[in-house]
Image (cartoon, grey):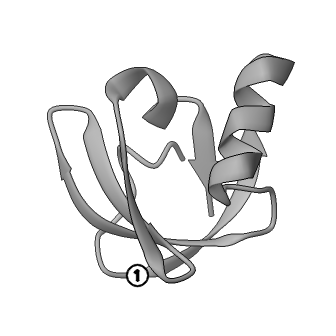
Amino acid sequence: MPIVLAPTNKILKIVRISADEKTKKHLENLGITINGDITILSSSGGTVVCKIKDGRIALDRNLSTHIFVA
């Protein structure tokens, strides 16, 4: 499921990123990698605030619909 629909405050595993190579590389530099752990802190209107390792990242609707978790 895309992280927009994912439950909050639960550790999830990133299973797929369906974006172009430039966007994948950018997300990888932010710490969003396949098989990485991510915790959704809040989600409203397509904007998602998530915790990756020790940092928080806000993703807009465009990026958050391309990241799939399980």
Could you classify mark 1 by the number of other residues whose Cα lies within 10 Å: few (under 14), some (14-19), or many (20 or more)? few
Q: State the image quarter where residue 57 is shown.
A: bottom left
Q: Residue at x 85, y 21 (%)?
A: 21
Instruction: Identify residue for label 1.
Output: 10
Q: Residue at x 62, y 64 (%)?
A: 70
The reply, left or right, for residue 34 in relation to residue 14 is right
Q: State the image quarter where residue 15 is shown.
A: bottom right
Q: Residue at x 70, y 25 (%)?
A: 23
In this orientation, which residue lies closer to the viewer: 5 or 57? Answer: 57
Q: Is residue 43 above or below residue 36?
A: above
Give percent across and percent down for residue 28. 75, 48
Q: Is residue 16 above or below residue 38?
A: above
In this orientation, which residue lies closer to the viewer: 37 or 70? Answer: 37
The reply, left or right, for residue 32 in relation to residue 5 is right
Give percent across and percent down for residue 29. 72, 49
The reply, left or right, for residue 68 in relation to residue 2 is right
Give percent across and percent down for residue 33. 76, 56
Q: Residue at x 67, y 42 (%)?
A: 27
Q: Secondary structure at mark 1?
A: loop
Give percent across and percent down for residue 62. 43, 20
Q: Is residue 38 visible?
A: yes
Q: Is residue 35 above or below residue 25?
A: below
